[in-house]
Image (cartoon, helix red, strand yellow):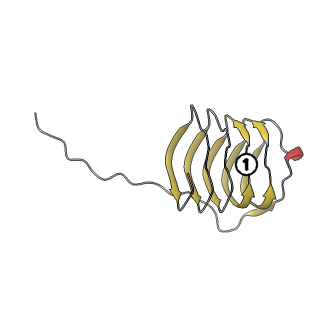
Amino acid sequence: MASRKKTPSRVALPRIPEQLEPVRLVPTDIGEGDQYADALIEDCSLNGLTAYQLELKRVRLLHVELGHAKLERLELTDVLFDQCDLANGKWHESIFYRTRASESRLTGFDAAGSSLKHVVFENCAL
């Protein structure tokens, strides 16, 4: 039997537009099934947020605190976490596609039952 030559896999990075709409969030604004697209979310605290079936597409989060957040069935497509705090979050049964966390804190992070494809953790505390 001939052995197959393995080709190096390439990770696809998030595809985020240059122009994003600034969005200011507070935990009480976020409801079940909410969707955010083409958005810049920055400098906000969403610590302890509990939400179900949120969807983020083409979103950059900058200096966002999501410590101890419980986000079940979250869908992330083309998302960048830049200098965020996701420590001790429980993001169960979620989908991460073309997602990158850069210089972020993820200690104690739990994504049990989640699907991760084309995900990069760069200079993060895991």
- Residue 2, compared with residue 107, is above or below; it is above
- Residue 35, compared with residue 42, is above or below; it is above
In the picture, measured across the screen, residue 63 lies left or right of residue 102, that is: right
x%, y% of residue 21? 77, 62
Task: Determine which quarter of the picture holds residue 51.
Answer: top right
Residue most extreme to the left: 1
Q: Which of 124 and 6 is in front in this view?
A: 124
In the rendered structure, which amino acid carries the disc numbered 1?
A: Gly
Q: Residue at x 58, y 33 (%)?
A: 112
Q: Which of 61 and 98 is in front in this view?
A: 61
x%, y% of residue 36? 75, 49
Label 1: element kind: loop
x%, y% of residue 84? 68, 58
Q: Which residue is drawn at 89% across and 44% down?
A: 28
Q: Nearer the viewer, residue 23 or 43?
A: 43
In the picture, measured across the screen, residue 6 lies left or right of residue 72, that is: left
- Residue 118, compared with residue 82, is above or below; it is above
Q: Judge the density around disc 1: few (<14), some (14-19), many (≥20) Cα neighbours within 10 Å.
A: many
Q: Nearer the viewer, residue 99 or 112?
A: 112
Task: Determine which quarter of the picture holds residue 83.
Answer: bottom right
Residue most extreme to the bottom: 18
Q: Residue at x 65, y 68 (%)?
A: 18
What residue does disc 1 label?
A: 67
